[in-house]
Amino acid sequence: MSYVNWIAGAATFDLSGLPQTYFLPDNSTDCSWIQVTFQALGLQFLLTASLPVEPLHYLVIHHLDYCAIGIQQPNRYVIYLLQPQQRVMPDFLESNFLEWARLFQPEQLATCRGFQAQSG
């Protein structure tokens, strides 16, 4: 199953947590979720360096206005902004979405959904 229609935006970060590329629809005006996910990755790096915690498998950011899921791919982190109707987490996390997110290349959003790529 493809979950590409669940995605309202995506952001890629290198393995040190620095922003690389954002994929946003043409009508996107609010990019505040990108800053919040950048801060969440930074907090995760700080915790991992300071405490004996497991490495990041995924992260979930619940906000009043959005929900974002972050996943580590082999050479980067990818944060997916979810469509409003996909914000219910229990069903979401029991699905195969996390495996799909690990394999999906967000660059495909430019071709299959018409998202615009912007450098970080």
Image: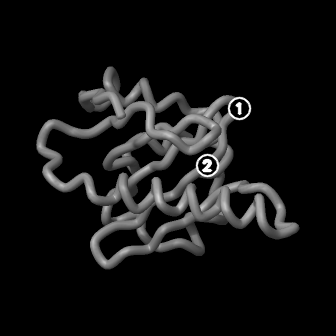
| Residue 16 placement: quadrant | top right
Residue type pointed to by label 2 = Ile
Q: Give the CA separation, mark 2 to mark 1.
A: 10 Å
Circle 2: element type: strand
Question: Which quadrant holds the C terminus?
Answer: top left
Toward the viewer: 16 or 86?
A: 16
Residue assigned mark 2: 71
The residue closer to the viewer here, 74 or 119, is 119
Report the coloring of the rendering: one colour
**Residue at label 1?**
74
Q: Which mark is residue 96?
A: none
**Circle 1 crowding by C-alpha within 10 Å: few under 14, some 14–19, many from 20:** few
Q: Amino acid at mark 1?
A: Pro
Percent from the top left, x then y, of residue 41?
56, 56
In the rendered structure, the answer to whether residue 13 lies left or right of residue 118 reads right
Whether residue 118 sits left or right of residue 56 in the image: it is left
Q: Quadrant of residue 119?
A: top left
Residue 69 left/right relative to 116 = right
In the image, is residue 91 above or below residue 111?
below
Q: Residues within 10 Å of mark 2 (few under 14, many from 20)?
A: many
Q: Position of residue 79 (x, y in %)?
A: 49, 48
Residue 95 spot, x, y in % from top left: 63, 58
Residue at point 82% right, 69% down?
51
Q: Position of residue 100 (x, y in %)?
A: 61, 41
**Element at badge 1?**
loop
Q: Residue at x 55, y 66 (%)?
A: 60
Residue farthest right in this picture: 52
